[in-house]
Image (tube, rainbow, N blue to C red):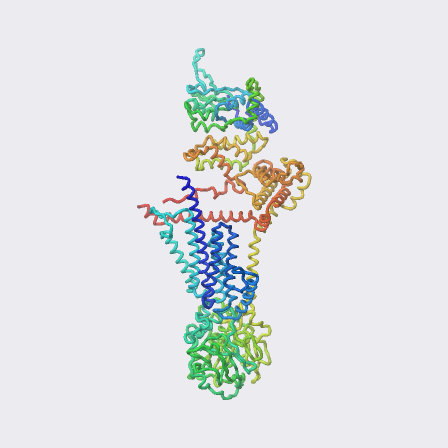
Amino acid sequence: MTVPRSREELGGAVPLDEFRTVTDAIVGNIEQVIEGKTATVRLALAVLLAEGHLLIEDVPGVGKTKLAKSLARSIDCTVRRIQFTPDLLPSDVTGVSVYNQDNHDFEFKPGAIFANLVVGDEINRASPKTQSALLECMEERQVTVDGTTYELQVPFMVVATQNPIEMEGTYPLPEAQRDRFSARIGMGYPDAGSELTMLDVHGAEDPLYALAPVSDAEKVRRLIATVREIHVADEIKQYAVDLVTATREAPDLRLGASPRATLHLLRTARAIAALDGRDHVLPDDLQSLAVPVLAHRVISTADAQLSRRTTDAIIADIVHRLPLPTERTRPSQPRPSTDRSQYQPRRG
Amino acid sequence: MSASTAGAAPARTRKRTVGSRHHLGIVAGAATLLAAAPLISLYEGLGWLVDTAFAVALIVAAATGVRALRGPVGLQVLAMLGGLLLALTWLFRSGEELLFLPTTGTLAHFGVLLDEVPDVVANQSLPVGGSEGLQLLTVIGVGLIAIMVDLAAVGMRRPALAGLPMLAIYSVPVAVHQGSVPWWTFMIGVTGYLWLISADNLDRVRRFGRRFTGDGRDVEHWEPSPLAAAGRRLTVIGLLIAVALPLVVPGMTSGLVDRFGNGLGGSGEGGVGGSPTAVNLFAALDGLLNRETTEELVRFTTTDSDPFYLRIGVADEITERGFDHRAPDGGPVNEGLPGPSQPRPGVTYHPHQAEVEILQWDMNRLPVFADPTAIEGLDDRWRYDPDQQVVFSDDTGAAGLEYRFEYQRPQFDPAALRRARPLPDDHPIQREFAEVLPEERVSDQVDELIEGIASPYEQVLAILAFFSRENGFSYSLDTGSEVTGSAIVDFLFENRAGFCVQYAAGMAWMVREAGLPARVAVGFSRGSQRTNNTYLLTNHNLHAWTEVYFDRYGWVPFDATPSSSIAGSIAPAWAPDPNAPPDPNASGGPSGPGTPGENPDFPDDNVFEGLAPEPGGGGGGPTETQAVWQSWLLAGAAVLLVLLILPALRRAQLRRQRLPRRAASPATGPRATAAPGVVTSGEPAAAARHRAHAVWDELLDTLIDFRVPLNPAETPRVTAERVIRECRLDPPADTDTTATARAPGGAGMRLLGRAEERARYAPQPLPATGLVSAVRVIRRALAGQSTRRVRLQAALLPPSTLLHWRTVTGDAVARAAVRATRLGDALARISPRRLLHSTR
């Protein structure tokens, strides 16, 4: 099976109006379960349409898994849930070849990863060995077992959750793994009104079970094709590069964002623009996405950690300070104000 | 740390700050007094200094008092003005004071005192003394400058600015008494200025806390440090260069004219010539001529209805410096003067009497007419040199003398002079007064002039005629720049501009070149202040002319200076003015009196009283100088005006470019009210984008002009929303918001934001309708909310334009710095020193 990557294989773009109708339906569906978190839900959907993966990180009980599952249920596609435990093995995720005595040959039994939506719960509880099994799946959307490569379906999205508070018996995600997640979002506590509504709705039965899909994989593939066609102006690309470069030059950050981060930032921005009904990306999109897309990939310096400056705050600060590129500061022109290397003191 | 010590530290800092400000205020006052040192040369005695010091002390005390009470800067200035007023009341009492407080009577008294100042300035010579009005003016002036210095140094913490008012003090004596301001007074002023600046710097360092020397001790007071020492050395060297350079470079003083100027241009040290024996005559004259003020020197009455020039000296010796005078020699005037000359054919002598009253003339020379026959009223210390025909003394001055003398006024017959023959070569006068330094161009010119003329008199006339306007000679106090290195050549051939000294010396030189004895006589023209037969001569009537010796006729005067430029100039019958139109009367009856060269258009001497600062300005300055000054002043004012309105002009031009008039009209049309966000494909996208960018730029500049902060990190959408919020551009909730025209600010702002956003980032921009009117409406709304000051500044000195210029300049400087660094690096790479370092 070949993975549909081109526009035709995906099924062709839909008009923006239709796009909005479908996505609004999905968001509305999820909001039946997750009250008062429209922005978070939209971001999760955007990551799906941007062909990325989502890391939901928050304290227990705020609805991380519920969000992942409701998103999966809203789309009529294959969903698998993996509960990451310390004894989970890579083959549990990717699949394993077993000997078939009927035809005297090894037969590949696909793992949990072979689905459109994979919900990885408590991902940091698995050993790094098992976590690493996700690397190839997430980036290359394929699985290689015993020298044979199996391609994954489209759409394919890993929604992982993790708990930042309880660290005992957990294995923090390695940098390479974190970089593969397009965005990290926190759920946050619901406001008082939403929580009251939640008591009413969730009191009798879990609405998740009543949730009916409002879209299917076929439709989502066309939505993905639509997102790919969103216009990105040169200034926006420049701004994305500027943002990522700024994280690499920020004195508070030991490790800046990777080029993959730039790609994810722009892709997610396209999806957000499409969700807004726009045919073009705005710098506002990049600004709103900078923290979710960049903050989990960077590593702050010891000084910044000591002064309790989170990476979220550092990224937000960069966004607040970085000037927008305009036509006056085209990439081809030298920009003396940001070229700091020229002013470094000579040594010798 | 206990709470008490924690509270004590800021208190100590505060106390130190206030204390340092007091200290700086006192230094500012002292520096002002030091800067007033150059005024010493203007006044007799130091009484004015005591008064000024008292006033400055009161000003400093007032400022210190207000600062101790933490009064604002405005209050400090008011207190200092009050202190000045109190000091003036105390120093210049009228008797109507209320204890120490001024009343209207006091102010009226000040008015009376100040009224006398113009008279004092016009009539008194320097140094002046005894004028209470002038003293009042001085105290007021220095007091105001002390206030400005205090304001700059303590109030604004910009002590470097205080240099301007301090320099203003120095400019007063320099303008009034050029060349006679001793250099050391300037140094005193400079010392005060440096003291102020260093005190401020020390104070700034102390504000950070205590100075740390590096060896563990902190320093409360001044202590040498190697870096500071280098800075001080640089300062001293710079100061020395600044002071010494003008003294060394001749072009920056009067230069070569002095060397050519027959010794008239001296060093100017003599002033008005206190001790008669010790003073160089011409140096003393130069001191007089240098004055910008007019001083009445001599008044004389004569029976002659058309007197010639009074003589005071002769320059007849050729030296390297040009014509110089030699010490006169002769017997006492009371032992008899040479008797009346015998009548000779061709010369008629008319006996006359004259009375001379010396007013402000304290030199060892007395002005007399040529050929005096008897003098009364002088003692034996006054002597007469029959050769130079001057009255002189070796041990007394002329001040206050009144004397009478009889003299013969010679009238030469041109026809007779024409018959005069050259002196024989061995004649003592020929030997003594016909020698000249070799100068090829001069001798060539003279040869050309006198070619084919045998009569010495005709030769002299030919040379006299050479100094005509047709030959390009003009009267000017500016003698032009040095060209050839020889002042005589410069004047005669290159610049052809000068005043009486140049003309007299130039003609004498040429006459000598022709082989005839000649010398330069110095004295007074007749001036312009005449009452009947009484003449009043001022320092501006000093004059020089040429005398040529003819066999059997003696010394005959010729005046080559253009008579129209000299008040009271004379062109006698035998020496016609080379510039005068042909005049049958002047061409010569034998007994015809000399034609007075007074130009009827020539204005009164007083007109030039402030405008003749150059040496040798005999007879006042020319009218061109005044015109030149006025035109320079006008041009300067115009340039200043243009510079001031340049930002506003540039802003208006930008606005016109960005908001074209024709685009404003469709704004009111139906399309303007169309729902924003509609994308047109009809209008060319590039043009619409360009329009949107231009309008957005204009909007940003407008926001800058009206002091709305901008953040370059904000997107157009965010900027629009923030400005709407901060500037309250949205109409109140009860207004109808659907009509764009009636809810202009907010809707327009959003429209502009969206237009710019789409122009930048969308494949298809918004149509460019309604943008221009929107930006105009926003501008009006912002103007309506701003204070008058902000509005004025937005109109006259738009901050956006200034910011743009500053940015452009800053970028250029940064680029230059980068280039210079690269160049330095490149040079360092090829420097052999690098090899030395790398081998270590």
State whether residue B261 is above or below residue B232: below
User: What x and y, as percent, mark residue B415?
Assistant: 54, 84
As rendered, which of B790 and B88 lies closer to the eye?
B88
Residue B750 lies in quadrant: top right
Outermost residue, front side: B99
Answer whether residue A218 is visible to the viewer in this image: no
State whether residue B604 is above or below residue B214: below
The reply, left or right, for residue B682 in relation to residue B552 is: right
Outermost residue, top side: A102
User: What x and y, as percent, mark residue B665?
Assistant: 67, 44
As rendered, which of A152 and B637 lies closer to the eye?
B637
Rendered residue at 59%/79% (across/down): B583
User: What x and y, as percent, mark residue B656?
Assistant: 61, 48
Answer whether residue B379 is visible to the viewer in this image: yes
State whether residue A309 is above or below residue B110: above
Residue A136 lies in quadrant: top left
**Quadrant of the rendering where the C terminus of chain A is positioned:** top left
As rendered, which of A154 and B651 lies closer to the eye?
B651
User: What x and y, as percent, mark residue B157?
Assistant: 47, 51
Outermost residue, left side: B840
The number of numbered badges drawn on the structure is 0
